[in-house]
Image: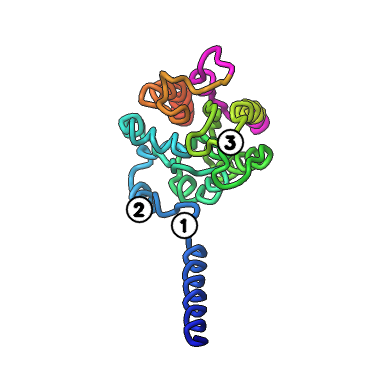
């Protein structure tokens, strides 16, 4: 009986060690997602990686649903579904700096508000985004900051409440941050929010789930961001 208990105890300890090791080496920031693509991209002409779009699933889906927008303009999508600004900071060198783009477009914080990795703390989120801006500037990359998109609720985090108030307050902070850092601030929010809706939800005409834009939503976003990028890229050639 004692032998059986000892063996069982040993098995538990071994299993715990395996789990601990797996956790220790977990790719929390998902460096593997774009590792091969980044190597390939760095070998291409700079004209094919003039602008990097950094973000979460909103950016990830954009590059998948509207690949022509990225390919035709020399833009690179570096969105990873579910990620927060904490993870953006961790992978910023591999997925942005090392590609040597002229511009990085930052769309962030939907998953911060949804508390995907941390309890939501507005000051911490703004601080993370401020650090992204500073890292870009320190490496000769022009940062463009965009609004967090409207979201009245999150289907995968139904327990999160007050998201519209949090996003509205955050966007005010982000606008002020852009002004402080003297960078361009792009407003997707006002064109995508449901007009007159007290819940300030993402317009159903532009989304199927209230968080992620559909193809029509991305067309609206493209109409907002493309002229800004074209102007900046043209200016950089002079």
Residue at horizontal 52 percent and vertical 22 percent from the top: 201
Asked if residue 119 lies left or right of residue 54, the reply is right
The image shows residue 205, relative to residue 114, as above or below, that is: above
Pointer 2: what residue?
36
The local crowd at label 2, few if under 14, some if 14 to 19, many if 20 or more residues have their Cα within 10 Å, is few
Q: Residue at x 48, y 24 (%)?
A: 228
Residue 103 makes an appearance in the image: no
At label 3, counting other C-alpha atoms closer than 10 Å, the crowd grade (few under 14, some 14-19, many 20 or more) is: some
Residue 10 lies left or right of residue 37; in this view the side is: right
* Label placed on residue 160: 3
Mark 2 lies on a secondary structure that is helix
Q: Is residue 175 toward the left or the right of residue 193 in the image?
A: right
* Residue in the image at 42% along x and 27% along y: 213
Q: Residues within 10 Å of mark 1 (few under 14, many from 20)?
A: few
- The disc at residue 71 is none
Q: Secondary structure at mark 1?
A: loop
Magenta stretch: residue 28 in it? no
| Nearer to me, 18 or 36 | 18
Q: CA distance from mark 2 to mark 3?
A: 36 Å
For marks 1 and 3, give the one nearer the viewer: 3
Estimate the x, y position of residue 138 in percent, counting from the top left. Answer: 59, 44
Name the image quarter holding residue 143: top right
Closer to us: 76 or 8: 8
How far apart are the two marked residues, 1 and 2, measured between alpha carbons?
15 Å
Q: Marks 1 and 2: CB-CB under 8 Å?
A: no
Q: Which mark is residue 27?
A: 1
Q: Which residues are magenta?
A: 177-198
Q: Is residue 63 left or right of residue 154?
A: left
Q: Residue 105, percent across and down?
A: 49, 34
Instruction: Give residue 77's position: percent from left, percent from top.
Output: 40, 39
Q: Can residue 180 be found in the magenta stretch?
A: yes
Residue 223 drawn above or below residue 31: above
């Amino acid at each position: 009986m004692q032998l059986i208990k000892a063996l069982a105890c040993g098995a538990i300890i071994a299993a715990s060690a395996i789990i601990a090791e797996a956790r220790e080496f977990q790719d929390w920031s998902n460096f593997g997602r774009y590792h091969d693509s980044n190597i390939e991209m760095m070998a291409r002409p700079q004209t094919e990686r003039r602008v990097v779009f950094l973000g979460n699933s909103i950016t990830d889906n954009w590059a998948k649903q509207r690949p022509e927008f990225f390919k035709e303009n020399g833009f690179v999508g570096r969105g990873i579904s579910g990620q927060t600004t904490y993870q953006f900071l961790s992978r910023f060198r591999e997925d942005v700096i090392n590609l040597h783009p002229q511009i990085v477009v930052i769309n962030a914080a939907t998953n911060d508000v949804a508390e995907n990795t941390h309890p939501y703390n507005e000051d911490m989120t703004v601080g993370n985004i401020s650090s992204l801006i500073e890292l870009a500037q320190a490496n000769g990359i022009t940062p463009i900051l965009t609004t967090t998109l409207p979201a009245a609720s999150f289907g995968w985090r139904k327990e999160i409440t007050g998201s519209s108030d949090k996003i509205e307050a955050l966007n005010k902070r982000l606008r002020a941050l852009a002004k402080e850092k003297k960078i361009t601030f792009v407003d997707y929010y006002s064109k995508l929010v449901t007009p007159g809706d007290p819940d300030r939800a993402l317009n159903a005409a532009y989304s199927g789930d209230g968080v992620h834009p559909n193809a029509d939503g991305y067309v609206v976003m493209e109409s907002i961001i493309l002229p800004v990028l074209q102007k900046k890229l043209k200016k950089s050639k002079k």
